[in-house]
Image (cartoon, coloured by chain):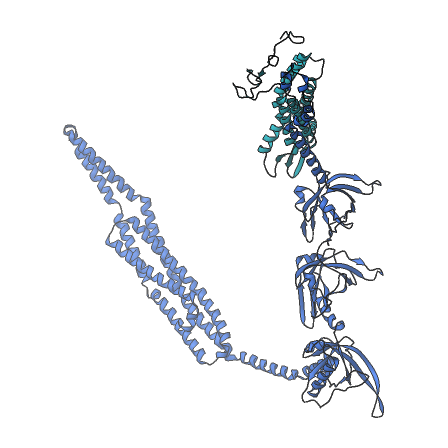
Chain colours: A cyan, B blue
Amino acid sequence: MENTGRPPHILTARDAGLVGCTHCGKVHPPSAAVCGRCGAALHARDIANLQKVWAWLIAGMVVYIPANLYPMLSTASLGHTTENTILGGVIELMHHGSYGVAAIVFVASIIIPVAKFIAIAFLGLTTTRRVRMSAHHRHVLFEVVEFIGRWSMIDVFVVAILSSLVRLDFAATITPGIAAISFALSVAFTMMAALSFDERLIWDALEDE
Amino acid sequence: MSDTNEQKPDTGPADLVISPPKRSFWRNLSYVWLVPLAALVVTLFIAWQSWAERGQRIEILFENAAGITADETTLRYRDVEIGIVEDVKFAPDLASVVIGARIDRTVAASLPEDAQFWIVRPEVSASGITGLSTVLSGAYIQAAFDPVPEAKATRFTGLEDTPLILPGMRGTKVTLRTDSGTQLTPGAPIFHQGIEVGKIETPRLTESGEGVMVDAFINAPYDRRLTSAARFWQVSGFSVNIGPSGLNLSIGSIASLVRGGIAFDTVVSGSEPIRSGQVFDLYDDEDTARASVFREEIENPVDLTVEFDESVSGLTAGSSVVYKGVKIGSVSFLGAFIEERNNSQEVVLRSVISIDPQRLGLDAEAPTAEVIAFFANAVKNGLRARLATQSIFSRSLVVELVELPDAAPDTLGIFAETAPLLPSVASDLPDVGATAEGLLQRVNDLPVEELLDQTIATLAAVESLAGDENLRAAPDAFVALLDDARGLIGSPETQALPAELNTAVSELRAVAEQLRQADAVNRLVAALDAAEEAATSVTDVAANIDTATETLPALIADLQALTEKANALEVEQFLAAASAFLEGADRLIDTPDMRALPASLTGALDEAREALAELREGGLIENTNATLASAREAASAVEDATANLPELSRRIEALVAEAERTLSDYGSQSSFNRETISSLREVRAAAEALSKLARAIERNPNSLLFGR
């Protein structure tokens, strides 16, 4: 990839008056709507794509608020009910001395989602704006975001497993809170946002110069 | 669309339409935007819902916050959770604890100012254990109130203890008035016909300090039984009452035993319902409570006047008026009046009695005139008033209405200004004291002295009869008779018999001992063994005839000598001696004395029987008891005497057994032996007869007397 930064002129499908399939890479005449090889919908750059990214991102951010304010799970043990939010759980874990687990939960549930929001927002903004970060780095960032998306569900998995396993009635019962659903939605929405993002837009900006 | 724009770079710009951008803003707007919109709506909804559910904050002041934990202790109303304690902090002056709590908005909306809150903890009291569930779940705050819509009080003062009467409980609250509250415990039960229907609160002094007031709460639906005719009285566990009606012991429930209690009952019917807060008197016991009804609550009473000529000591205002034993009214007034009669002034004792027409079976609403007409008619038929004692133990009097058909005809005196006059007759029980005196007089008049004299004379006659000479002689004669019998049994012949037998046995034993010492049998056996040995050796030797021929004669000679030796043993002699001895024994047993013994006993008994028959014929049956006693003494003497008989028979039996053993040692079935054994059997039979006799006498000494 020595041509990152200031690459020589590359003939893209759009320049050639064709539409490339984003799925399998086969190019089609612009009139074609569906990829003849893999059946995916064909479209050249579409400003609506970016709209989708923003829409999913905002949705993810919206549901991320209750995910942090409401209890993730409520533990009922011997008649005493304890409810913990994500951050509250992290603090409690730290009080118990489980710094490692606290760090994992903190990273997976707070840092990564927030970082994802920032990254996707940054990528969305930089498609039309000039930034100092090179297109190549942005592309890497996008790939990281897309990859890491699925790993943000750790919290949700933990809650799902705990609440299905710990059902001892009076002795101990764990029930998922509103935050669990919200968090799961938030992760799903950000993944959708990342999926909707057409990485070609990163390079389009470069071409337009 | 952007594609089409790009496709026509060379055509004229006139074709370009400006409008799309404007349209395109909405057209391009993706449906995906609905997602964040929906997310926003849902989030806002959740936020609104949790805010709505957050509940109303209230503050409750408590003296202390034992068992209260923030975010854990719950608030309950009718045992349903309505909120949770948010924080526990001090009041600014540190004098109390302020507990902040969030409660359900629907509940908070109708929470009145006087709502009561108290902390429920496990509690053990005389009436039971409460709040046991809080041992596990921890204390909680219980709320009790009567819901008032739109009442939104938020500051309350908590109670220290569980209130006895909760707001919102259905029932009626009344106040009881009594002299002392010693038997009243807060929370003591109220019973109605034995069922717990309510509770009392803490007794308090009246404002004047002279009495005690206590609020009582009767639960619905029992409060319907509470009318103006209800009477309350104390039931203090158990009461003992000794009165004219006897001993009366009543025991209430255990709870009332520990805490005391109050009972009420509707004593008369047909009274109006009460309003809440009505004041009732609390009586000391049921009888007082029931009696109080007549004193105060006669509905529509009819007054009658009764004049008495005799003393009315014991009659007071409030005394009962009784008709055929049923209380129908009470004396309401008692006084002396001076009346002009036959031109002279006379003091008349006049009492006014109030009659409850209902008690007489008349309608409670009947007009007075009707009741008076009833009485006028009754008087014509002989209804009279007279004084009577309430009971034989008391001096208090009651006015008794009696029907005396043969009384002098009279009428009910109707006066304008006073109540109608009911004619009276002199009571037939003038004075209890006089009656008692009369009783004593009669006791005094009884011919006690004569009775005693007669008794003494009778006893003397009895004594003289008992002291009669003939009577005394009778037992003596019997004793002599028995002495004879004893002498017979104790005669030297009888006594000597065992000794003789003994010597015979010892002789026998000595012989046997000699035999044993001589070791005759053993030696015989040994000799025979030796002979056998010798015989074996003879056979051995016979095999070697050559060498043996010389020794054979010597051996035979030895054998002969040995046999001679064996023959020389004094077996025959011994046997003869034994035989002689046994014959002696036989003879001894066969002696006439021995034989005569049972016969003589029988003779003696026959004599005794005869003597008894004589006694019986003597016609002294009255004294048979005394005679029997001495006879029994005599019988025991006989018994003592016969006690020797089994001894004797035992000895004989022992002897026989010994002899038999010796003989069996001896062994062979000789005719001598058989003889000996048969003679011994005879001895034993004699001994058995003897012991049987002794046993019979022992078992039934009376047989000596009655011949059975």
Which one is in front, A22 or B306? A22
Residue displayed at 74% across by 85% down: B424
Q: Position of residue B334 (x, y in %)?
A: 80, 79
Q: Is residue B598 above or below residue A71?
A: below
Q: Is residue B94 left or right of residue A91?
A: right
Q: Quadrant of residue B336?
A: bottom right
- Residue B577's place in the image compared with B36, above or below, is below
Residue B575 in view of the camera = yes
Is residue B554 placed above or below A101 in the rendered structure?
A: below
Q: Which residue is at a point 33% across and 61% down the rendered structure image?
A: B685
Query: Which percent across, then down, holds residue A72?
Result: 66, 31
In percent of the image, x 65 and y 82: which residue is there?
B448
Where is residue B435 shown, x and y percent of the image?
Answer: 71, 81
Residue occupying the far bottom of the picture: B342
Taking depth in this image into account, of B281 and B367 the one nearest to the observer is B367
Q: State the residue in front, B587 or B181.
A: B181
Occupied quadrant, residue B41: top right
Q: Position of residue B603 (x, y in %)?
A: 38, 72
**Residue at x 70%, y 17% (from the top left corner):** A126
Quarter of the image with the C terminus of chain B in it: bottom left
- Say whether residue B181 is visible: no
In which quarter of the view is residue B240 placed?
bottom right
Of residues B529 and B420, which is closer to you in this image?
Answer: B420
Q: In screen coordinates, is B523 left or right of B410?
A: left
